[in-house]
Image: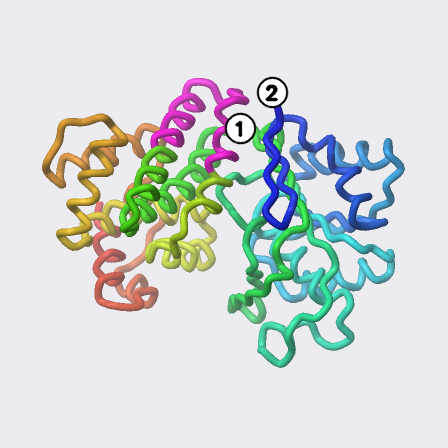
Amino acid sequence: MKHNNHENSQIIKIGPDSLEELPDLIQGCAHKALLVHGHRPVEDGLLTKVRILLNKEQVPYANMGQILPNPTYKSVKRGIKIARKENCDVIIALGGGSTLQCAKGIALGLHYKGDVWDFWTGKKKPKKTCPIASVMTNPSSGAELSTSCTLVKKGERKTIHDPSLKCTFAILDPKLSMYPLFPTMNQAFGLFIHLFFAALKTDDEKQLEEAITLIKDLFLAADQLKMNQDDLEARTSLFKIGYQSHTKLNVSKCSIESIASNLSFKYSLTEGTAGSMLFIAWLKSLNQKQKERSIEIAKEVFSADINQFEQALSLFKKQLQSVGLPLSIPESGLIISDEELKKHAVDQQTKEILLNSNKP
């Protein structure tokens, strides 16, 4: 399959075997790489593939493993120490968004003589950042395209934004994302909620059409993967949809994405599961105009002759349930009291969403 290469002040390689281009990409911007990863790239063989590839092309590298979800300030400090000792000048994340957050933090602190946390407190602004790159296995993250970095210190997450935090290059090779159905559908839900919110909020007819088309493509790919988890074309589609959703649609995060992110951090859930278990309650909380737009979206996505919100709701529920996603907190297996949930509410609407999501 032909690679699709996209450039927008950075190099993005999408397609099967695009990993093969890694040595040339490194040599185009640096001399020695620091490979940052968690346990999954080790278990799945990604780290081994990368090492073999770099050894074959005689590209020097150092290694930093044991990065957990929601990377910490301490991990970044450890990475800075390794990168300095090994004279690394490009930081490459292998895996998902968490390893990339850590890589971004290392790149920020590599040439800074003070405490890297100064950037998160606002004491200092980044002046010199070494190249950041990623070999992504999650099509929904979008972290490779973002200018943000989120770290955890003393149990609290803090995010900063800076143009230098966008990846110099990223590789999106679907052969590296051959996960079982449930984690794949969690990733797909991350794409869906971004696209749905874009379709819901936009006043631009072209953007609405684009978002609906991408949702249709996403559901088609999900259905194909449900039948055959090794469908490489469908997995390639997920990466293309992810890229397009984060570059073509100008939309802020949906309110439940932020709540889901907090719940996933607090209760060790994937963000896809945390989001899907809130989705139906959130949909029911929309105002009348938004519900009418939801009907319009469902009509187009499912080619359905409907005119009632409950009909649209039913179609989305059926689609999400068909790929095994939980649509309430009890369905996710999480046991949590209403009183505890209320602590995560930022306003009355989110409070009602959380409480309604906790009903069987």
Q: Image height check: is 109 above or below 360? A: below
Q: Main secondary structure of the magenta part?
A: helix
Give the residues in magenta.
216-241
Q: Is residue 248 left or right of residue 322?
A: right
Query: For the N terminus, which image quadrant?
Result: top right
Question: Colour mode?
Answer: rainbow
Residue linked to disc 2: 1
Single out the mark in the foreground, 2 or 1. 2
Identified at 74% across, 59% down, the residue is: 130
Q: Is residue 333 visible?
A: no
Where is residue 238? Give x, y as percent. 48, 33
Residue linked to disc 1: 236
Q: Which element type, helix, strand or loop, lies under badge 2?
A: loop
At label 2, which amino acid type do we have?
Met
Q: Are marks 2 and 1 in contact (CB under 8 Å)?
A: yes
Q: Which element type, helix, strand or loop, lies under badge 1?
A: helix
What is the number of the mark on residue 146? none
In the foreground, 300 or 283: 300
Where is residue 321? Give x, y as percent. 30, 32
Q: What number of labels is visible?
A: 2
Q: Is residue 233 visible?
A: yes
In the foreground, 27 or 111: 27
For residue 341, which quarter of the picture?
A: bottom left
Identified at 67% across, 31% down, the residue is: 18
Identified at 59% across, 39% down, the residue is: 6
At label 1, which amino acid type do we have?
Thr
Earlier residue among tags 2 and 1: 2
Q: Image height check: is 193 above or below 346? A: above
Q: Residue furthest left?
A: 308
Alpha carbons under labels 2 and 1: distance apart? 10 Å
